Image (cartoon, helix red, strand yellow):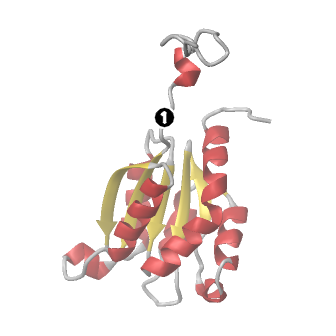
Amino acid sequence: MEGPRASENEQGKPDDPITSAVVAPHAKILTVSESVHAGTREDRSGAALADQLTQSGFEVIERRTVPDGVEPVASAVVDMARGFGGLLVTTGGTGFSPTDLTPEATLRVVDRQAPGFAEAMRAVSPLGRLSRGVAGTLGSCLVLNVPGSPSGATESLAAVLDAVPHALDLLSGGRPH
């Protein structure tokens, strides 16, 4: 018995080259840390997130670091989201330290908040109650703030990762309902 020809699917119908191509969703990671930015500490949370995203089928196309503060974070988020239809994860700056200002920076620049993502990320761990991270959209980019510890970052992202492709599809104009 012959299999389908190269230009046909298993039902013997021609493949649609537009819908048959599988494209990995794109992701970017912004690490917010004075010491990582200064080069005095390794970016363990950014590396852990990159591994997690790659293992989940995302293509991580950019990683960047900035120091703490509203202006550096807001500027980086805007720059990284410009013309980008994908997931932007920030790690660090979500706690109670006086320099933890990532949520304030994010809220300054997003078009719309996505509180369901932030709530789900906080609910995954008892320490989640200490996170002030937010989520929102900027153009067709979904922005998620996760904690700066590798375990907190990956646990938080794991709590919402299953819903991210659907959100990105909706942001890009898809109507999957």
Image quadrant containing the N terminus? top right
Image quadrant in which you'd find residue 120: bottom right
- Specify the farthest residue to the left: 39
**Image height of 18 relative to 76, above or below:** above
103 vs 39, left or right, is: right
Does residue 119 appear in the picture of this structure? yes
Does residue 71 appear in the picture of this structure? no
Question: At x 25% / y 73%, what residue is drawn?
Answer: 37
Q: Nearer the viewer, residue 60 or 116?
A: 60
Question: At x 48% / y 13%, what residue is drawn?
Answer: 6
**Figure label count:** 1
Q: Secondary structure at mark 1?
A: loop
Q: Nearer the viewer, residue 14 or 43?
A: 14
70 vs 43, left or right, is: right
**Image height of 14 relative to 78, above or below:** above
Question: At x 43% / y 44%, what residue is drawn?
Answer: 82
What is the x, y in percent for residue 60? 39, 51
Badge 1, how many Cα within 10 Å: few under 14, some, many 20+?
A: few
What is the x, y in percent for residue 106? 52, 64
- Specify the farthest residue to the right: 177
What is the x, y in percent for residue 157? 56, 66
Residue bearing the label numbered 1: 23
What is the x, y in percent for residue 150? 43, 78
Image quadrant containing the C terminus? top right
**Image height of 171 relative to 64, above or below:** above
**Image height of 112 relative to 100, above or below:** above
Circle 1: residue type:
Val
130 vs 69, left or right, is: right
